[in-house]
Image (tube, grey):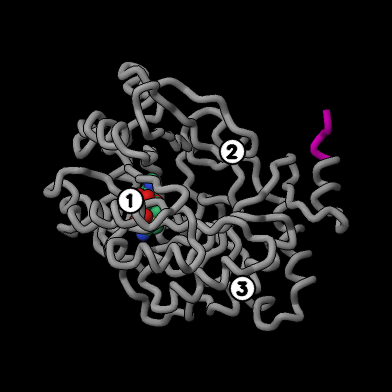
Amino acid sequence: MTDNRDFAALASDRRVDQLFDGIGRRFEYLRLSLTDVCNFRCTYCLPDGYKKPCSRPTELSADEVRRIVTAFARLGLWKVRLTGGEPTLRRDFDEIARTVANVPGIRRVAMTTNGYRLAEKAAAWRAAGISAINVSVDSLDPARFAEITGHDRLRQVLAGIDAAQAAGFDSVKLNAVLMRGINDRELEAMVDFVSSRDLSLRFIEVMRTNDNAEFFAERHVTGQSVIDRLQALGWSRLPRQAGAGPAVEFGHEHAKGRIGIIAPYSKDFCSSCNRLRVSSLGKLHLCLFGDAGINLRPLLQDDDAGDELIERIRKLTATKAPAHRLHQGNSGATPHLASIGG
Ligand code: SAM
């Protein structure tokens, strides 16, 4: 067995075009936030809506995005997820999607959206090179959807999901955060929804951030209780795929769709973490619940800084903490997930 020191050496070895941290986790997947602005007001994230600060640096430009993605691709990352905030609020979203899809080495561009423009834009985003899409749908009941998100737009979002399927995305997934006393009784309805459709559903355990501690205490539903309910409905755990991230997958012999559970409070969740994040201001976040991000932006100003950027990413990644500190009630520096990119 290789010990941690060997992995640290591997992580800093210039000849290896793969990215490892100090405990041997390999990174092939970058989550890139394009903006921290969101137009929805989800109760667990931005219940009072996005508040514009008095002064705010501009978001990464398409050129800066190209440079950062190129650096990660040279380190062996091949999948990028565009997220936010709501990434599709960016006017240059289509251009950025195309830019990322054209970076040599990038084989899969995914996005996460609240779906408010999906019905009209699905075909254009597919044509821009996005092949996988996650859409947040926390309720299938229009009134409850409006209560959770602050927008009466369920019909529009569901039409977007149909449009995404028609546009030929390889993967269309629904993200749902289950909350005690709000939408947890909808689990069965959501399971039915994906049982008859070629869609995947991800139940995400609500996570405690610095802004939602009280909400979390009142509304948190454990991943294990969701698993128990799925098993009672006849769903069974699927074997873990090589290189899979922290989601635990379930299938059912009579269901077309699949279900995954993202349960960050479960034991060993972090051991399969394959995620690195870059914020819309160019900060590298080694963990969603880590301390403040590390600013890479000065190295994104021209194409020549590529080697230095790569070296910096490699060295920083080697220092990624083995696990988050959520169990100690420590959400790091994260006010809400829109600030880093959920
Ligand atoms: N605006 C996009 C959307 O609505 O999907 C992308 C950004 S959003 C931050 C990404 C995902 O994070 C969504 O599925 C959302 O439900 C989830 N999320 C946000 N805050 C969360 C929290 N505190 N706990 C669990 N999931 C959260």
Depicted 292 relative to depicted 158: above or below: below
User: Is-magenta flag for residue 328?
Assistant: no
Q: Amino acid at mark 3?
A: Arg
Q: Quadrant of residue 2?
A: top right
Depicted 95 relative to depicted 236: above or below: below
Q: Quadrant of the N terminus?
A: top right
Task: Find the magenta span and give its range.
Answer: 1-5
Disc 1, SS: strand
Disc 3, SS: helix
Q: Which mark is residue 244?
A: 2
Does the closest atom of ligand 1 sit within 8 Å of the Cβ of label 3?
no
| Residue highlighted by disc 1 | 136
Q: Amino acid at mark 1?
A: Ser
Residue 25 or 331: which is nearer the viewer? 25
Calculate the distance from the C-alpha at mark 2 to the C-alpha at mark 1. Answer: 21 Å
Would you say the magenta stretch is mainly helix, strand or loop? loop
User: Is-magenta flag for residue 4?
Assistant: yes
- The percent position of residue 163, horizontal first and vertical second, equals 31, 57
Q: Residue at x 79, y 55 (%)?
A: 17
Q: Is residue 295 left or right of residue 143?
A: right
Calculate the distance from the C-alpha at mark 1 to the C-alpha at mark 3. Answer: 26 Å
Q: Residue at x 44, y 27 (%)?
A: 250
- The percent position of residue 337, horizontal first and vertical second, equals 42, 55
Residue 268 or 79: which is nearer the viewer? 79
Disc 2, SS: loop
| Residue highlighted by disc 3 | 66
Q: Alpha-carbon neighbours of circle 2 within 10 Å: few (<14), some, or many (≥20)?
A: few
Does the closest atom of ligand 1 sit within 8 Å of the Cβ of label 2?
no
